[in-house]
Image (cartoon, rainbow, N blue to C red):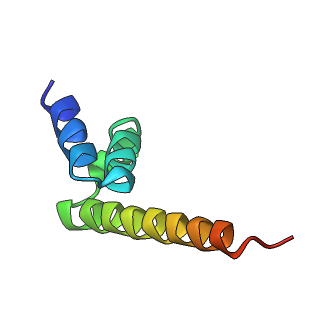
Amino acid sequence: MLDHATVANLRTLKLTGFAEGLLEQMGQPETLAMSFEERLALLVDRELNARSDRKRARLLQRAQLK
């Protein structure tokens, strides 16, 4: 229950990449063996990549390339 509330709060904060990464980590038992810092680093990287992808998609859409 707490995990779902955390994911909902992350989405409210517009940290969708972080939320998706957390859901993915909860579904993979091998990530539970990692340290907190390693898991946090993976989540931060996931959020940065998600933001970069959204920015790239937005810029390509605005460029109106043929």
Is residue 62 positioned above or below 50 on the image? below
Quarter of the view holding residue 66: bottom right
Looking at this rendering, what residue extends furthest in the right direction?
Answer: 66
Q: Nearer the viewer, residue 10 or 3?
A: 10
Position of 6 compared to 21: left or right?
A: left
Image position, residue 39 (x, y; %): 28, 59
For the point 30% across and 55% down, which residue is it? 15
Is residue 3 positioned above or below 59 on the image? above
For the point 39% across and 46% down, which residue is it? 20
Quarter of the view holding residue 61: bottom right
Image position, residue 21 (x, y; %): 38, 50
Looking at this rendering, what residue extends furthest in the top direction?
Answer: 1
Quarter of the view holding residue 35: bottom left
Image position, residue 47 (x, y; %): 37, 63
Position of 2 compared to 20: left or right?
A: left
For the point 54% across and 66% down, which residue is it? 53
Position of 46 compared to 2: left or right?
A: right
For the point 19% across and 34% down, which residue is it? 3
Q: Nearer the viewer, residue 1 or 38?
A: 1
Is residue 19 positioned above or below 8 on the image? below
Quadrant position of the N terminus in the picture: top left
Labels in figure, total = 0
Is residue 57 positioned above or below 20 on the image? below
